[in-house]
């Protein structure tokens, strides 16, 4: 039996967050100037990737930006412990 995860905005954003972190990218939420309730997602480290890959990732980020921002602001990115453990073990 194959079990597929639910296809919800939250699950798509969680998967994207894990992918970005596994590539060594930093995911941040920044407040939009003049709009106190609006945040944008900033990805640090994209220049280290192939430009086509970076463009594809940024399209995915834009499609999932609201949920990614909510995750980062709530300080509850999924798999954060696993990502940090992987980084520590590779040092």
Image (tube, rainbow, N blue to C red):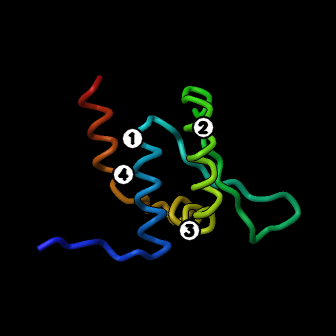
Secondary structure at badge 1 equals helix
**Residue positioned most to the top:** 91
Q: Residue at x 28, y 48 (%)?
A: 82
Give the CA distance from mark 1 to mark 3: 19 Å
* Disc 2: which residue: 44
Residue 2: horizontal and vertical position, in percent? 17, 71
* Disc 1: which residue: 22
- Select label 1 or label 4 by which is in front: 1
Secondary structure at badge 2 equals strand
Q: Residues within 10 Å of mark 2 (few under 14, many from 20)?
A: few
Residue 35: horizontal and vertical position, in percent? 83, 67
**3 is higher (above) or lower (below) than 33:** below
* Disc 4: which residue: 80
Which of pointers 4 and 2 lies earlier in the amino acid sequence? 2
In the rendered structure, find residue 86 and report the number of the disc placed on it: none
* Disc 3: which residue: 67
Secondary structure at badge 4 equals helix
Asked whether the residues under the numbered discs 4 and 2 touch, taking CB atoms below 8 Å apart as contact, a structural biologist would say no
Which of pointers 1 and 3 lies earlier in the amino acid sequence? 1
Give the CA distance from mark 1 to mark 4: 10 Å
Q: Residues within 10 Å of mark 1 (few under 14, many from 20)?
A: some
């Amino acid at each position: 039996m194959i079990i597929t995860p639910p296809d919800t905005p939250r699950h798509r954003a969680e998967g994207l967050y894990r992918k970005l972190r596994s590539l060594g990218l930093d995911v941040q939420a920044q407040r939009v100037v003049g709009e106190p309730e609006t945040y944008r997602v900033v990805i640090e480290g994209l220049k280290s990737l192939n430009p086509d890959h970076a463009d594809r990732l940024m399209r995915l980020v834009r499609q999932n930006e609201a949920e990614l921002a909510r995750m980062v602001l709530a300080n509850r990115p999924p798999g954060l412990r696993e990502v940090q453990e992987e980084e520590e073990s590779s040092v």
